[in-house]
Image (cartoon, rainbow, N blue to C red):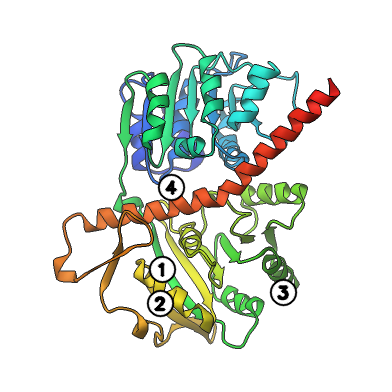
Amino acid sequence: MMNRIEEMMKVEGFKTLTPIQEAVIHRKDKQRDLIGISTTGSGKSHAFFMPIFEAIDASMDEVQAVISVPTRELAWQLYERCKKLADHFDVRIRLVTGGMEKKEGGLVPHIVIGTPGRMKDLFLDDQTLLLNTAKIMVIDEADMTMEFGFLEDVDMILSHMSQDITVMVFSATIPEMLQPFLKKYLNNPELIRISSNEEFAADIEHYLIPLKHKTMSERVLDVLSVIHPYVCLIFANSNQEAATLAHDMRQAGYDLVELHGDLEARERSRAIRQIQSQKKSYIVASDIASRGIDLEGITHVISCGFPKDLKFYEHRSGRTGRAGRDGLAIAIASPKDQQAVVTLRKRGIDFKEMDIKDGHFVEVKDRTKRNAPNKKVEMNAELGKVVHKKAKKVKPNYKKKRAQELENVKRRAKRAMIRKEIQQQKRERAKAKQRAKREQ
């Protein structure tokens, strides 16, 4: 008879566990507080899902685990990922974020997934959601929770929780300013730090496709005719460009999800649900609208030109090639993008200049490399600086350091992309409180 972890792996279709999952799930003292440090795309969601479901008693009508994340979209993703296990084990889960109507009555959830501010409002202000019965509290994306000002809400929630609650903190980094919070609420925590692992590292090819004398929509359709994606994420540099491309792709017969800032809130929520259901293979998005979406199974990323901030290109391409899977990042470039290509090459991106002939990608002479320095380059800890080194003088741990620097680039890009959403959430909460005062 299989144990519950084996049963969960079977339900999720996992053949093996990633390093962070292995380390967290099989630790000796599962009641001990935990700090888990791992890179984006390492499978850390299931590293805390599986211990939670192992501990849940579905016969008890009380909240037993709370999972806090800084944005509503990240909360929605966790909620969607959690559903399959919840249905299998007859466990009730509830999503609690801003922008949702307050629910009262009904069955008590066993697991609550939500944003700190909304959970605090329902738990401490309205007292309609009792979280103090929880035995496990997970704080995901802890560094961003702190950076965007939500740590105070988490602090207030934890101060009203049981003294013997197990606190699990997950983050890509642990900034110095987070240390006082950790010392206050974590008792002798176990530290699990997973560095980049080649078995699960991103393996991404970068293709550079010339725009030639075509429109961007025409060139995207050329590219789509020769790829067979599981999920293809297509980035435009503005809301209008995304809307135009989505229209032209629909006219060409592609069933897609459209996600950009010009959509109404209801349309955007519907788009996110469609994305998480993974029933459609094509997603057309702007950088800002796609912030916080960490979607598994992206095999192809297409960039329609380059964003002004080139860190966003690195974030775009980093959406594919996760957890040991191969990925292909395709950039469609016009002559004005040559300097962007040179800059990105200096940052370590190895573009292959390709074209499309007879329904296939073919490699062509690379016209931009002649303008690029003929040296190997790497990013140092300060993003944007480039260190030139000859191959014969590469120092030990070069690959490890460079992988960490690339992860830092992705992390900073992710923070920038969700910053606007955080600000929007704060404004909405403030307006809601003002309306509530007027109604009293």
Answer yes or no: do the residues labelled 2 and 1 have beta carbons within 8 Å?
yes
Q: CA distance from mark 2 to mark 4?
A: 25 Å
Up-down relation of residue 218 to residue 431 (above or below): below
Mark 4, secondary structure of its residue: loop
* Drawn side of residue 211 relative to residue 349, left or right: right
Residue 287 % position (x, y): 59, 59
Q: Note whether residue 360 is visible.
A: yes
Q: Nearer the viewer, mark 3 or mark 4?
A: 4
The kind of residue tagged 1 is Glu
Residue 152 % position (x, y): 53, 27
* Drawn side of residue 326 relative to residue 153, left or right: left
Q: Quadrant of residue 437?
A: top right
List the residue tagged with mark 1.
205
Q: CA distance from mark 2 to mark 1?
A: 8 Å
Which label number is shown at residue 40? 4
List the residue tagged with mark 3.
252
Question: Mark 3 vs mark 4: which is more N-terminal?
Answer: 4
Question: Mark 3 vs mark 2: which is more N-terminal?
Answer: 3
Question: Mark 2 vs mark 1: which is more N-terminal?
Answer: 1
Question: Mark 2 vs mark 4: which is more N-terminal?
Answer: 4
Quarter of the rendering occupied by the N terminus: top left
Mark 4 closeness class: few <14, some 14–19, many ≥20 residues within 10 Å = some
Mark 1, secondary structure of its residue: strand
Quarter of the rendering occupied by the C terminus: top right
Answer yes or no: do the residues labelled 4 and 1 have beta carbons within 8 Å?
no
Residue at 19% in and 70% down: 391
